[in-house]
Amino acid sequence: MGFCETIDRIIGTQRKKKLYDDYSFTIFSKANTIPEDKWTACLGNSNLFLTLKYLHAIEQLHEDSMYFRYIMVFKKDQPILASYFQINDFTADVFGDLVAGQLQEIQSKRSKLFEHYLDHNKDKVVFRLVTCGNNFISGEHAFSHSNVISKKIAFQIMNKVIEVVGKSEKLRGKISATVIKDFEEHTAVKRPLFNDKFVEFSVEPNMVITIPKDVNSIEDYIKLFSKKYRNRAKSIFKCSDGVEKRQLKYEEIKKYNAQIYELYEQVFVRAKFKLVKLSYDYFAEMQRKMPEQFEVHAYFKDGKLVAFKSAFILEDCIEAHFIGFDYAINKDLECYQNLLYDFIELSIEKKKSILQLGRTASEIKSTVGAKAEPLVCYVKPQNTVSKMILNPFISFLQPSEWIPRNPFKEEAEVSEQA
């Protein structure tokens, strides 16, 4: 323990270390030790998810389940790039659950020995995952750079930064894999983005809705649909008759915290890939720390909380965040689809033209007007275990096949003619 504390004292001393040429860097382990003016100077855009206010909130909420690294890069003495890492250690029992399906596909003595090892070391940390980016949010939130350097130079710097983080974390134990997430297609058009030690793979696309300028209500939005999808939307709305909807402030979120978290867990346990889990107080604390940017909306039926949604209100868009609902009544109330329409209504009310609906359930999201924006990630296996499961693991994360739906009149007509 003393050794780790010594390393933590070394990391975050604001002492610059040489990266290459005129570039140097500083590693921080705590967001509150970072000079905010210098970090902000590195952010070339208004990305809330790379602000120290947000990163500090995430760190405080999850410091018991993961730890963090913040890298600031300087060109001579000028801060020019900020990058963010989340580091997860998995015990044998948790890691075994994650890779069970992958190991079954690997017919070898080595995989059998590894399964045996996992069974007999359930409480021992066997896998470390270093994520450059944010496991709680889809999209490009791994790093940002000032306009002093080009995007091409930024990626060259990040290759070096990732190498540095890998070396520093080996002081604590062997890294199993490094993942860099998530790059949109327009960013990734000139590939490869990273060196040949990284393997590129596709993940579920981000589903995005663009709200037309002349749409001022959810009714206006539905009018753009073909008759089939208009009728479908009306039927879905009808299922929510008698459901009370209201926005919750901090004290109310605290009051309903147990029910909110139970509904969140109902969705979480059904997720295809369960890498990180929210802390118990996540929704209340995030609303308390970011009252202007984070909202939680609750849905009550006969006085009982049956669903909720959360969202980040960004400068130019709404970021749909975690949701929860009671699967026992989902079909009767059409909870999930009503939540999707309510995200659209929230975007219209807030006068935001873009709604980011995130990954998963792509086909259902397309029925309310969402379009797919492909995402790619990079992974670098760093030991025998991660190399062994890499191919089946990437195959597991590949986007599922789905049929895009076109609810809008013009697109539906064109589709039918084609």
Image (spheres, rainbow, N blue to C red):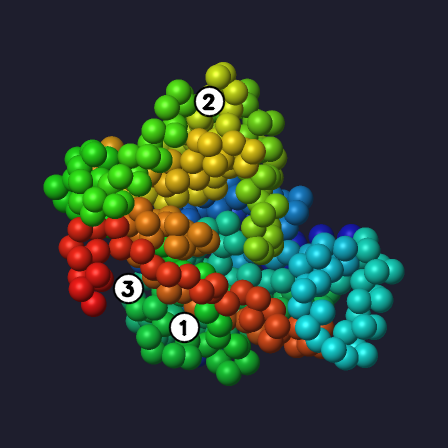
Label 1 Cα crowd, 10 Å radius (few <14 / some 14-19 / many 20+) = some
User: Residue 116 or 34: which is nearer the viewer?
Assistant: 116
Label 3 Cα crowd, 10 Å radius (few <14 / some 14-19 / many 20+) = some
The residue at which mark 2 appears reads as: 300
The residue at which mark 1 appears reads as: 155
Report the quarter where the C terminus lies: bottom left
Q: Position of residue 157 (x, y in %)?
A: 43, 72
Q: What secondary structure is marked by label 2?
A: strand
Vertical comparison of 130 with 409: above or below: below
Asked which quadrant contains residue 243, the reply is top left
Residue, x 52% and y 54% (percent of image)?
135
Q: What secondary structure is marked by label 3?
A: loop
In three-dimensional space, the C-alpha distance between marks 1 and 2, rounded to whole angstroms, equals 47 Å
Q: What secondary structure is marked by label 1?
A: helix
Residue, x 32% and y 43% (percent of image)?
318
State which mark lies toward you, 3 or 2.
2
Closer to the chain start, of discs 1 and 2, is 1
- Tell me if 98 is positioned left or right of 41 in this view: right
- Tell me if 138 is positioned left or right of 260 in this view: left
Vertical comparison of 164 with 88: above or below: below
Label number found at residue 147 = 3
Q: Amino acid at mark 3?
A: Asn
In three-dimensional space, the C-alpha distance between marks 3 and 2, rounded to whole angstroms, equals 48 Å
Q: Amino acid at mark 1?
A: Phe
Q: Are marks 1 and 3 in contact (CB under 8 Å)?
A: no
User: Residue 286 or 154: which is nearer the viewer?
Assistant: 286
Residue, x 81% and y 79% (percent of image)?
109
Residue, x 55% and y 42% (percent of image)?
267
Closer to the chain start, of discs 3 and 2, is 3
